[in-house]
Image (tube, rainbow, N blue to C red):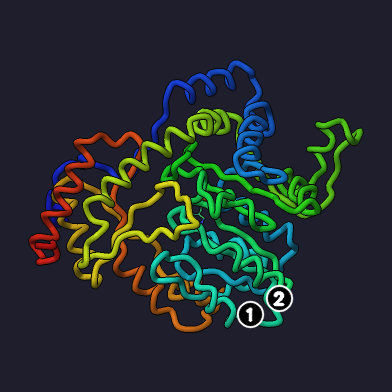
């Protein structure tokens, strides 16, 4: 007989909840009325224009996911067996999988313990004659030290890439994240600040990568040239796949992008409420924002002394109906990470973050009462465990 799981109270505060409003509904209706829901139509073009305007990227192609945009990077750069791409071990699987799919090797390095972004000295030590690219990941929408990475890439003739999955609407020294690397990828997944359920974008900042990327998105064909009237028929030009986002999803994305400033501002208020309460704690670690970074309030993450406390906090909050979430599993320790990648150097800070980090619920439609409940519940847990300041 299967025993019932211990009953938990209903969820009062989810970890995230997208905020779809009138604008998204109107754009969705317009897309259906237009009768053409395949990708590349007016909604797609409008999203790409907004993203281009927002970031200053030379060309933006919206895609079915950030994962797809990362795969497109590997194809556009013609990476393959024998090539290495340096990246943090503290990241989502897609950052590595996209390159492993082409036969290239993800080389995992450690992170900075304050920002959880790539540690530039660990990157420097990991460069070999096989290194082709450095992939920075802007954790929590907080920018990596981009000038330093630009210099390092220039010194070693490496391609700079950005996994900006979490970084829509965030800046480094006033310049949009996603506009530094030769290419960058955004995510519009359900959990992100701007979402259409599943979606992403490839940002291209280098002219000679625009055309190959267009071919790749359209099954390896020059269909985009055909639609612009530049060729009389379209044909197979390169390797590629089906990386166009449906117009239905693009319509929802358009509504979200039009409200980007308001959605980010609403998140920022919640982020700041959390920080006002916990930011000066000496017993838990709270976000560190470098002065050059303008972040987008994507994540408010706290870190405990050890995993036992972190896991106890998850259980305590859950009993209060609150969902708080750990984040990445250290990639170099996963079965596929070991099979397809390799670790370079010690991974102390990656392992620490994987074991001790906890993300608090954060979404633009979160009401004051909900924020207060999270703050009170977390404060109660800290008190109970002797972690609250006197
Ligand atoms: C750093 C990073 N890269 C890539 C992805 C994949 O994004 P998507 O779900 O849009 O493919 C994520 C998803 O959370 C992520 O956090």
Q: Which mark is residue 156?
A: 2
Q: Does 190 sit left or right of 241 as displayed?
A: left
Residue under numbered circle 1: 127
Q: Secondary structure at mark 2?
A: helix
Given residues 306 and 319, the one toward you in this image is 306
| Residue 358, image x, y percentages | 29, 59
Q: Secondary structure at mark 1?
A: loop
Given residues 94 and 112, the one toward you in this image is 112
Given residues 232 and 368, the one toward you in this image is 368
Q: Which mark is residue 288?
A: none
Looking at the picture, does residue 318 appear above or below residue 44? Answer: below
| Residue 254, image x, y percentages | 55, 30
The residue carrying pointer 1 sits among few (fewer than 14), some (14 to 19) or many (20 or more) residues within 10 Å by Cα, namely: some
| Residue 147, image x, y percentages | 61, 64
Given residues 9 and 362, the one toward you in this image is 362
Are the residues flagged by discs 1 and 2 in contact, CB closer than 8 Å?
yes
Q: Does 106 sit left or right of 215 as displayed?
A: left
Point 35% across, 59% down: residue = 287
Q: Does 366 sit left or right of 81 as displayed?
A: left
**Mark closest to the chain's N terminus, 1 or 2:** 1
Point 23% across, 41% down: residue = 371
């Amino acid at each position: 007989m299967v025993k019932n799981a211990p009953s938990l109270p209903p969820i009062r505060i989810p970890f995230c909840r997208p905020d779809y409003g009138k604008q998204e509904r109107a754009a969705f209706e317009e897309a259906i009325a237009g009768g053409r829901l395949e990708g590349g139509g007016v909604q797609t073009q409008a999203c790409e224009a907004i993203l281009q305007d927002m970031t200053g990227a030379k060309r933006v192609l919206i895609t079915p996911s950030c994962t797809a945009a990362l795969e497109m990077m590997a194809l556009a750069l013609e990476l393959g067996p024998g090539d290495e791409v340096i990246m943090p071990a503290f990241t989502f699987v897609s950052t590595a999988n996209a390159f492993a799919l082409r036969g290239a090797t993800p080389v995992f390095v450690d992170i900075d313990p304050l920002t959880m972004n790539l540690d530039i000295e660990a990157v420097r030590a990991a460069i070999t004659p096989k290194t082709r690219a450095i992939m920075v990941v802007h954790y929590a929408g907080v920018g990596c030290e981009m000038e330093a990475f630009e210099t390092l890439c220039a010194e070693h003739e490496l391609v700079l890439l950005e996994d900006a999955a979490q970084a829509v609407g965030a800046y480094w020294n006033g310049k949009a994240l996603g506009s530094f690397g030769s290419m960058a990828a955004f995510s519009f997944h359900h959990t992100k600040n701007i979402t259409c359920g599943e979606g992403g974008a490839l940002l291209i900042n280098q002219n000679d990568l625009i055309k190959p990327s267009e071919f790749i998105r359209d099954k390896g064909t020059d269909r985009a040239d055909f639609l612009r009237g530049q060729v009389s028929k379209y044909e197979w030009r390169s390797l590629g796949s089906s990386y166009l986002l449906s117009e239905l999803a693009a319509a929802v994305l358009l509504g979200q992008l039009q409200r980007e400033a308001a959605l980010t501002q609403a998140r920022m208020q919640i982020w700041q409420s959390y920080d006002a309460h916990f930011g000066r704690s000496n017993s838990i670690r709270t976000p560190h924002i470098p002065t050059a970074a303008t972040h987008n309030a994507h994540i408010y993450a706290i870190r405990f002394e050890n995993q036992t406390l972190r896991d106890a906090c998850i259980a305590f909050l859950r009993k209060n109906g609150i969902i708080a979430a750990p984040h990445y599993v250290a990639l170099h320790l996963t079965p596929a990470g070991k099979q397809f990648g390799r670790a370079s150097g010690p991974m102390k800070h990656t392992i620490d973050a994987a074991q001790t980090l906890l993300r608090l619920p954060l979404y633009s439609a979160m009401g004051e009462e909900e924020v207060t409940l999270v703050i009170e519940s977390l404060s109660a847990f800290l008190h109970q465990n002797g972690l609250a300041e006197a």
